[in-house]
Each structure stands twice: as structure tokens, then as C-alpha cells.
Amino acid sequence: MQITAQTLDNLSRLTDEAAVLTDAEGTIVVANEKATDLLGHQIVGNPLEAFIRLPDLPAAIRRANAENLPSRFAYSRMDVVKRQFNISVAPIDGQHVYVFLQDTTLEPTLERLQSDFVANVSHELRSPLNALNGFIETLLGPAADDPEAQQQFLPIMQSEAARMQRLIDGLLSLSRFEAEAYRPPVDHIKLLDLIQSVVAVKQAQAEAEDMRIVVQHAPEATALILADADEMAEVFHNLLENAIRYGDNGTDIIIDMAENIGLRGTHRQGVLRVRVINQGKTIDARHLSRLTERFYRVDEGRARSMGGSGLGLAIVKHILNRHRGRIGITSDNGETCVALIIPTLSTPS
């Protein structure tokens, strides 16, 4: 029986996972689309061990045919994010071996996300809840008939309730983006157009602070990227929100785009670099590497008083992980720059 790529695709489609067929020595004969996406498009005709670094795998493939013995292994693979697989090896027809890779990454991730979500909610909501309880007790007790106290406390209670809503919304968004980090996006979008649409929305907010958002780009910075448009819009909404919130009144926020340039300004083929630059208080270097951690704030009191939840840059980082991009932050002489690099797909004709 001859097993073709179509046959293998049909088999693997039952579970929608990566699968390859090797000969008795482990050379890949047929690979389905999921396998080529995971391991590379030139894998057919090459040894499987060249793409999966697992010491016991070659012997297991040989043993599968020689002894009609299936095997199963746990396998970790580091791409932009760490992924976990169960690899199953089974003989097919005495000449070929079927190797199936089941992606189990999300199983422990979802458990951890649930645990982290509960811990974060408990910690971050304790303060506004305590404040609300205190005000409510006062209004029900000593200040029950005090209109002046009511006028003083009710706006504060409204502000604390709004803060809790922002925290919950941010946590739900972050959990969703973390869970999606292992599923690469599939839509082709022109990032320049998306950024300009976000700027059009945020420009009025900037003008209210006597600020202006200016988009600068090289003529060729029009490459397409593989992206989820809503998620990438969330990235630039968050970055511009921070730039407006923490930038100085009367200054410009610059969005600078260039192709084939890395985070540090050196040549890097096949990426689009976007920088969001604002003028304001310099961030001490010791904080920069931690700014993308959830709830990390340089000045906690100032951030909370200005409406910051401490989740914006964490959300940006997780969205970039899904898009196989990276983020770098610098701050010097009153200028803070958040730089992103995102792989390009192609240049439109």
C-alpha cells in the first residue's frame, strides 16, 4: 500500500495535528501541512531527527518497524514561546512509520492562567473593595444624614468602582491573549493603514492634552504582516494611551515606521520596526526590563491616580508573542521609546 501526502493529510485531519511518515530509518517521506508549518517546508527527504531534537526518537522509529512496537514521548520545543507536545510513533505497513505530534501546550497553560487570574484579581481588587466598603459603612452610619459627606464620598466610590471595572476588563483581555499566544494569526494586513486608523481615534484625546500624534514612515514601510487586526489595534491603542497619559502637555507623540531594521537600529531582513516615542519624565533604567510584567508600575500612586491598571504593556507583550514579534523600551533625557519588531509577510505590488 502506498501512502500519499493526501492520505496522510486525511488521517491527520481527524485530529488537526502535525504528522509525518518516515521510512524505517527515520527519513521523512510524507508530511502534512501542519508538520511543514511546525518543522519547515523543506523537511521531506531529510531525517526527522534533524528537526526534532529528541535523543530516543531515532531508535524508537527503527524499533517500530523491526519489533512492531509503538512508542510515546513528551517533547518541548522553543519557538518564540515554549510549546509542549506528545509524540506518538507507530508502524504502518512494515516499511513506514507514522509519527504524530499532539500539541498539549494549552493544557497546563490554561490551568496556570486560571490560577494566576484568581491570584491577580484577589490582590488588585482588595484595595478598591476595602475603600468602597469603608465609604459604604460611613454613609450608612455616621454620615447617613450628611449631604456634604455624601457629595464628597460618592465621586470617590464611583472612581474606585470604575478602577475595578478597568482591572477586570484588563485581566480578561490578558488571559485571552495569553491563551491565544500559541495560535499564529492568519490574516494579511497592512500595518500602516491599521496604525493610521488607531491614530485617528486617539488624536482627539491627545489634542485634549495639547499633544499631537505624528506618523512618520519611509516610503517602503508598507509591507504586509500576518496579524489579527483587532489585537494589533489593541497594541497601538495601549501604547498611545500610555504616551498620552505619561507624556508632557504640548509635546508631539511620534510613531516611526521602517522596514528591515531591528530593535537596536541595525539591519534585520524581513521585519517591520515601529517606534512610539513620547516626551516626559525619564524612566530609570532599573525599571525598563520589568515594564511588561502585569501590574508592574514605576510610580504606583501616580499610575493609579491617572487611571493606569498596570496591564497595558503586559497585554502588548502577549499580543506580540502571538505575532512572533518583540518589544524593547528605552528612556533617556526625557524621551521614552517603545519599539516593536514584527515579521513581514510580503511587499504589496
Image (cartoon, grey):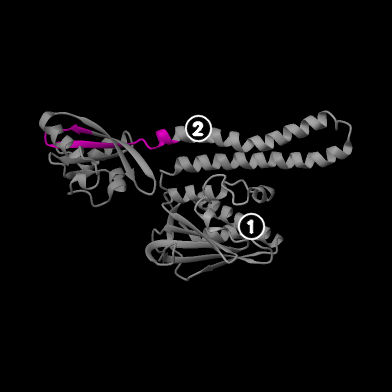
Q: Residues within 10 Å of mark 2 (few under 14, many from 20)?
A: few
Q: Secondary structure at mark 1?
A: helix
Residue 99 numbered tag? none
Q: Is residue 157 left or right of residue 273?
A: right
Which mark is first along the chain, 1 or 2?
A: 2
Is 171 above or below relative to 288? above
The three-letter amino acid code for the residue at tag 2 is Ser
Percent coordinates x, y for residue 195 in the rendering: 54, 59
- Amino acid type, residue under disc 1 in the picture: Tyr
Which residue in the structure is indicated by mark 1?
246
Give x and y (percent) for residue 186: 41, 49
Q: CA distance from mark 2 to mark 1?
A: 32 Å
Which quadrant of the figure has residue 48?
top left
Dot 1, crowdedness within 10 Å: few (<14), some or many (≥20)? some
Q: Secondary structure at mark 2?
A: helix
The residue carrying mark 2 is 115
Judged left or right of residue 343, residue 1 is: left
Q: Identify the residue at image location x=15%, y=38%.
A: 2
Q: Is residue 93 visible?
A: no
Q: Nearer the viewer, residue 75 or 226?
A: 75
> What span is in magenta?
89-109
